[in-house]
Amino acid sequence: MKQQDNALETKALNLYYGSAQALIDVDIQIPKNQVTALIGPSGCGKSTLLRCFNRMNDLIPDCTISGSILYHGEEITGRSTDVVELRKRIGMVFQQPNPFPKSIYENVIYGPKVHGVRDRKQLDEIAEKSLKGAAIWEEVRERLHDAARGLSGGQQQRLCIARTLSVGPDIILMDEPCSALDPIATAKIENLITELKDEYTVVIVTHNMQQAARVSDYTGFMYMGRLIEFDSTPVIFEKPKEELTENYITGRFG
Ligand SMILES: Nc1ncnc2c1ncn2[C@@H]1O[C@H](COP(=O)(O)OP(=O)(O)OP(=O)(O)O)[C@@H](O)[C@H]1O
């Protein structure tokens, strides 16, 4: 794969929480405009790796890293990286939908307002585009000024995706985005993820192997802080090269 096709890349990435090592020599290349899933047993480092991509681990005291993290080929681990700008470009969606206690509209325009957009017409346009991008516009267009927390869990999660889209990212990181949702809401988010890759690069952490197989183009299998295998999703699920991967995907441990 050519260097410029990678939205994200790590080289010899090691991460410590205090003296406990959570990532060990991770080399991964995340292809642009594709969906990449990170799978592996609980505690293997999936969320930790995901959080490295937009420097969310900076917020954790005693967390240190060595190695390289590249965003479109550019090093982002250094002090000169503008982390606020980086998080605009690399958005994140969490396990629990976490809308602000504000209206649907205020949730979506919150980020653009913080970044200085004041013009009402422009904010309206951003709100509509983001809500459409997150496949929730039709459900909320008549009630934009109602409380976001009055929406269903699945709608709240799509609203949170809209909030992420509103500041113009090109990468969306999702940490178990469906784990709090029922199967119907999950299916809607999975369909949305597939649509998002036309415009965005998506990296998703999931416990659910069927979900990884359904939505992703590439899958990385992690185990005890190491990336054991990374390949196209059909290869990982049908013909993995590593015995550990095979044991995991066939349910022999996990
Ligand atoms: N803030 C933290 N402080 C200290 N240790 C942490 C912190 N976050 C994670 N860890 C440790 O780092 C290791 C990797 O955790 P991480 O949450 O990345 O794994 P995971 O694969 O995402 O797990 P899960 O699937 O259960 O969410 C674990 O041993 C965990 O206990």
Image: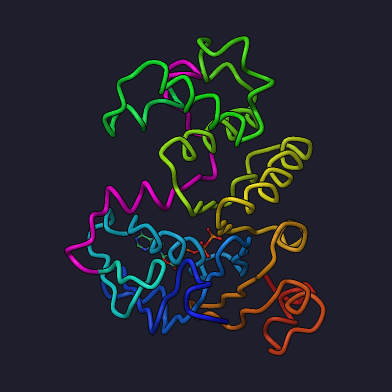
Q: Work out whether 102 lies above or below 93.
A: above
Q: Nearer the viewer, residue 158 or 101?
A: 158
Tell which quarter ligand 1 is in.
Answer: bottom left
Whole-percent x and y of residue 45? 48, 68
Whole-percent x and y of residue 80? 17, 63
Say left or right for 66 vs 196.
left
Q: Work out whether 188 lies above or below 252.
A: above
Q: Is residue 96 magenta?
A: yes
Q: Nearer the viewer, residue 129 or 102?
A: 129
Residues in magenta, as a range: 78-106
Whole-percent x and y of residue 40? 61, 70
- Residue at position x 36%, y 77% in the image: 21
Q: Work out whether 150 lies above or below 216.
A: above
Quadrant (top left, top right, bottom left, bottom right) of the C terminus: bottom right
Q: Is residue 11 magenta?
A: no
Whole-percent x and y of residue 143? 59, 10
Quadrant (top left, top right, bottom left, bottom right) of the N terminus: bottom right
